[in-house]
Amino acid sequence: MRRPSIGVFDSGFGGLTVLKELAAVIPAADYLYFGDTARLPYGSKSAETVARYAVEATHFLQQHGANMLVIACNTATALAFDKIVRAAQIPVVGVVEPGAERAAASSKNQKVVVIGTEATVASHAYLKALQARGVDVREKACPLLVPLVEEGWTEHAVTEQISRIYLQEAFGDGFQSADVLLLGCTHYPLLKTVVRRVAPAHIAIVDSAEATAQAVAELLKFKPPPTPSADERRQFARIKFFATDSVEKFRRLGGRFLGQPIEDVQHVDLKE
Ligand code: DGL
């Protein structure tokens, strides 16, 4: 099989959690990561605006040689997936369907809580995807979590307290018996430790990033070798980074999301 060139698109840094999973599962690939850092956050914007930004990024990644596109941003997938697919001449994978599929498969009593940005929750994209699989769903917007993660406060007492409040609300009122929590935002994998501590003990945590990487591997019919370790496998992936705002900030913040240092970042000016 020809080495695939996979375009990965996100509003900023968060999609690097998806890239991290992709590079571990499909190391024999070239990746083009596009972070629209000048225009983040997407999570508080309208569907029209997010779709316009996402279509521009799609064109950029195609022009730079991507032969497959992964929409790592939950908000962009939730609000603009169909428009992106229409604008793309290459296969497109979003994070919502793989995340919903894995959450449905992981729930024994078919009851799932999904957390995400305000825009993702308002779109009901996860609700629809889960209901189509016969699952009862509670959606909960957690808008304070993205800035806390970007601040680097992933283990902070404030973050723990806020997460506790959000999750108490999400699992209250008839949803105590939900047995899966679906992380429907790129930033939330960094909060897994805190979420594990404050969420009801019996729940399974499902991460859209991991599920998406598996879905892309299946599409490419790629089987990762059982060894070496995920970290070693990632070293084989060739990654180019593009950002629409400061490359210095992208390097600094991005390394935390990717779990490894980021060296070269190219600045991109998307003329509207
Ligand atoms: N990437 C976004 C998401 O997964 C979170 C950050 C933002 O709001 O732009 O929904």
Image (cartoon, rainbow, N blue to C red):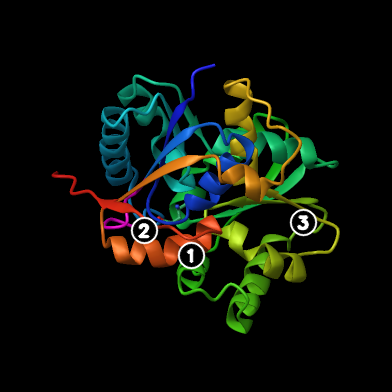
Which residue in the rendered view is the most extreme toward the top?
A: 1
Query: Between disc 2 and disc 3, whose residue precedes?
Result: 2
Frontmost residue, 140 versus 34: 34
Q: State the residue position of label 1.
A: 146
Q: State the residue position of label 3.
A: 174
Instruction: Answer few, some or many: residues within 10 Å of disc 1's Cα (few below 14, many 20 plus, some between 14 and 19).
Output: some
Please report the bounds of the magenta region as a residue range: 34-40
Residue at 57%, 40% (x, y): give it.
22
Mark 2 is on which residue type? Pro
Q: State the residue position of label 2.
A: 41
Q: Mark 1: is the Cβ under 8 angstroms from ligand 1?
A: yes
Q: Nearer the viewer, mark 3 or mark 1?
A: 1
> Could you say where residue 142 lies in the image, as x and y percent from the top left?
54, 63
249 displayed left or right of 134 = left
152 displayed left or right of 203 = left
Q: Are marks 2 and 1 in contact (CB under 8 Å)?
A: yes
Image mark count = 3
In the rendering, which numbered label is found on residue 46? none
Instruction: Answer few, some or many: residues within 10 Å of disc 2's Cα (few below 14, many 20 plus, some between 14 and 19).
Output: some
Indicate yes or no whether the magenta region holds residue 133.
no
Name the secondary structure under disc 3: loop
In what quadrant of the picture does the C terminus appear? top left
28 displayed left or right of 92 = right
